[in-house]
Every structure is written in structure tokens, then in C-alpha cells.
Image (spheres, rainbow, N blue to C red):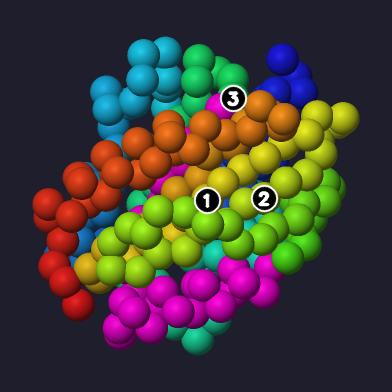
Amino acid sequence: MKVIRRILTVLGLAIPLGFLGITISAATPNLSAKLLSVDQMPTGWAVNNSPISSAKDCVNTLLLPKGIRRTASAGEYFDDDGNIPTFEEKLATFSGSASYAFDKVISSANACKNFTAGGHKFTMGQMSFTHYGNQSAAYTVSGDIQGESIGEDFLVVREGNVIAAFAEADLQPVSTDLSQFEGFVAKALAKLSRTIRTR
């Protein structure tokens, strides 16, 4: 169980973090209300309140692209009964064009081929995946933590003026269940698209 908790802390939070410290004003959307809730997850899944990683590697800072200001953000992290697989959803808005913000995020993601998180080495690359929203790009991450092979699939989507990032992590060779991941993403984007404006 200690290894699994370590995996949850290191890799389950491996995508866009640093969402704390953003002040949401009346002019910015309440992104927290647009996140998936635990009652939308399968039976046995729960909110994981593990400490958020403060790592500054290229994946953990993905939704903090240089040269553009983030105006609002929110996120939620779920696990399957305290174990893996895990699923994470992050939402953010930026000053200026959302399309430009998406391009900056994807440029950073495309440049992130190898990184270290929590002292563990990971590789990342693009993957073929269903297109979502106005723009989307998908990636796969793999590495080893304490002798366990870990895989994570993640997707970055622009839906109107919101940039969303989703990730599901699991042990390999079991790897993530893409149909489950697509189901989570579809639910999350359905909830998000009901309340956003297009830009």
C-alpha cells in the first residue's frame, strides 16, 4: 500500500498543478462548479485529498505557460477506493485568446519528452486519441516508481474559453482503460460545455 500511495502522490498528480493561489473575481468563471463530482464517478471512487505536488517539471507546470496570465483555475483528483487507477481534472482560463493559450500549453507539452518528478524519471509522447472540444491533444506518460511500471494518459482540451486537462494513471502492463478515460472526459466536457461561452 505504501508503494501505491507513493504512486498516487508522484504520478497521479503529474499533470497540470499549481492551481492554488488564484483569486476568482466576479469577472472570472466559477470553475469549481464545472468540475466532475464524486457522484459522477463509478462506485468505489472517491476524492483523493493527497498533498498537491509542488514539482516544477514540464508536466506539473503545463497549465502555467510562460508569457500568458492564468485568470482562474480549479481541479479535482479521484482514485479507485484509495488505490489506482486515478483520474484528475484541471480547468483554467487565461487572459487573451483561449486558442492562443491552448497553443502555448501544447507547445510546452510537445517539448516535454523526458522529465523527473519526485526523483523518478518519466518519458512522454503524443498519442492518437478521440478529438474533443474546439481543440485537443493527447499524450502518454510512462515510468517506474519503486519497481512498478506506471502509465498515464492525459488529454488537453480547449472548450470555449476554458483549457481543460484530464489524466488517468494506472499500473502497466494493465495500463489505463481508454474507454473508461474517454467516458470520464465525455462526462466532464458535457458538464463544462453547458455553462461556458465560446471565444
Q: Splitting the image into 4 quarters, where does residue 47 fall?
A: top left
Report helix, strand or loop for mark 2.
Answer: strand
The residue under label 3 is 84
At 59% from the left and 20% from the top, the residue drawn is 83
Mark 2 or mark 3, which has the lower sequence index? 3
How many C-alpha atoms fall within 10 Å of the one at disc 2: few (<14), some, or many (≥20)? Answer: many
Q: Which mark is residue 133?
A: none
- Could you tell me how far apart the alpha carbons at marks 1 and 3 are, in whole angstroms? 15 Å
The residue under label 2 is 141
Asked if residue 13 lies left or right of residue 70, the reply is right
Relative height, residue 33 to residue 9 (above, below)? below
Q: Which quarter of the rendering shows the N terminus?
A: top right
Q: Position of residue 149 (x, y in %)?
A: 78, 34
The answer to whether residue 165 is visible is: no
Asked if residue 77 lies left or right of residue 52, the reply is left
Relative height, residue 63 to residue 111 (above, below)? above
Q: Nearer the viewer, residue 133 or 2?
A: 133
Q: Position of residue 114 (x, y in %)?
A: 77, 62
Chain part drawn in magenta:
85-112
Q: Splitting the image into 4 quarters, where does residue 3 fall?
A: top right
Say which of marks 1 and 3 sits in front.
1
The residue under label 1 is 154
The answer to whether residue 81 is visible is: yes
- Name the residue at the right extreme: 147
